Image (spheres, rainbow, N blue to C red):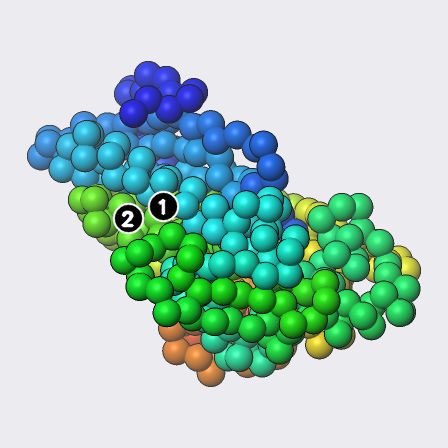
Amino acid sequence: MTRKGERAAAGGLAFACFAALALTPPAVGAQVETAEGADRAEGVRAEAGRADGSAWLEREAFLMGTALRVKARAGSREVAAVAIEAAFDSVDALERRLSSWRDDTALGRLRAEGRSAAGPATLELLENARRWSRRTDGAFDPTLGALVGAWDLRGEGRRPTSADLASARAASGWRCFEVEAGDGDAAGGADEFGEIAARCPGAWIDAGAFGKGAALERAVATLRARGATSGLLDFGGQIAVFGSPPDAPGDWPVSVAHPDRRDEPAVRLALDAGSVATASASERFVVLRDTVRGHVLDPGTGEPVEAWGSVTVHASDPMAADALATALFVMGPEEGLDWAEAREGVAALFLRPGPDGLEIACDAEMSAMMERVRETTSKPETWKGC
Ligand code: AMP
Ligand code: MG
């Protein structure tokens, strides 16, 4: 299938800048769901033939309101192309269930009409999201659509009146939703399987904090099922990797940007697998009584979290990395570090700009990912645990 914008590969340039992958924090409040009418444009970026007949292929598509860049290796260029195509389709399919920026998806209908049919895959994702809410004591809570509306986080931002804030808080939380698994059979498919309904007027679910991660999980699984043996995916700043990088077998180099200066790498990591996601307040924000707040809300208070810096989370499951980056941003660098330290399989890095420079704090698991490349990192002001 030829995609819009496809162009001949720049074969000679193949992967010259592969090692310089930059991970900038995703824009705070970046739409992870596509606004109506947004286009999906992509093209072949680079490819390289290998002596053993395997090939790397790179393509980019516009999905969920941002760019998804995929580099994948397979036994042949054709296999890689088909695998990447299928990965894009899997993300597209997820967006058609999760987006609340349009009315023709399960979560979009829930927002517009207060109830919606939902297929088994959608219900499973919501169950998974609910589990992460529980595990983070509600710091991650996608049921706060009403609060996103009250603060106008999808627009210019505004401080709600205390009455509006109170009613938005009353319309947020898992207790505001009822999920019915339905008795249809999964093979019957589509969205007729179960139902999700809002119990509180005005309540809706915002997939903004986990949609990209869930999509990366789907994309990686699809690439592997279609024969890709290695790959790197960059979805608007969240990275996922599997297999080994081109040329140098070993870890994938990823840099984490300074929270205030997104073009400046602050820390370098070496990933062997899994995904890293960053939450910050550095790009889209609202200013309230002279304090800058991002698009992450503290479900405990209903208020946007102050812009204290950024947190980067590594986990094997991309959806977990995404949800946990948001959760640890809510918890903040102290409580968040304790939380991550106590959880096996969750690595966290906190960057906090201060009067004496950048404070860098991380748990033992993240420290292990940094050590291998520490000597290439410029000396920061303060290290804590790294
Ligand atoms: P992220 O960029 O992954 O941190 O997600 C931020 C987006 O998720 C916001 O733009 C809101 O749409 C939504 N959101 C804000 N606060 C929370 C929260 N505490 N838990 C879950 N979703 C949130
Ligand atoms: Mg997130």
Q: Is residue 26 visible?
A: no
Which type of secondary structure does the marked residue at label 1 adopt? helix
Q: Mark 2 packing: few (<14 Cα in 10 Å), some, or many (20+)?
A: many
What label does residue 90 carry, if any? 1
Q: How many marks?
A: 2
Residue depicted at x 40% and y 62% = 193
Look at the picture and state if 212 lies above or below 168.
above
The answer to whether mark 2 is within 8 Å of ligand 2 is: no
Q: Residue at x 42, y 70 (%)?
A: 181
Residue 3 in which image quadrant: top left
Q: Please tell me whether residue 386 is drawn above or below residue 260 in the rendered image.
A: below
What amino acid does circle 2 point to? Answer: Thr
Q: The N terminus is located in which quarter?
A: top left
Residue 277 falls left or right of residue 80: right
| Residue 9 image label | none
- Please indicate whether residue 249 sits to the left or right of residue 215 in the image: left
Task: Check the image and name the residue furthest to the left.
Answer: 52
- Extreme residue toward the top, this view: 8
* The residue at label 1 has a CB less than 8 Å from ligand 2: no
**Residue located 29% across and 53% down the image:** 221
Kind of residue indicated by mark 1: Ser
Give the residue number, with chain letter if any, for mark 2: 222
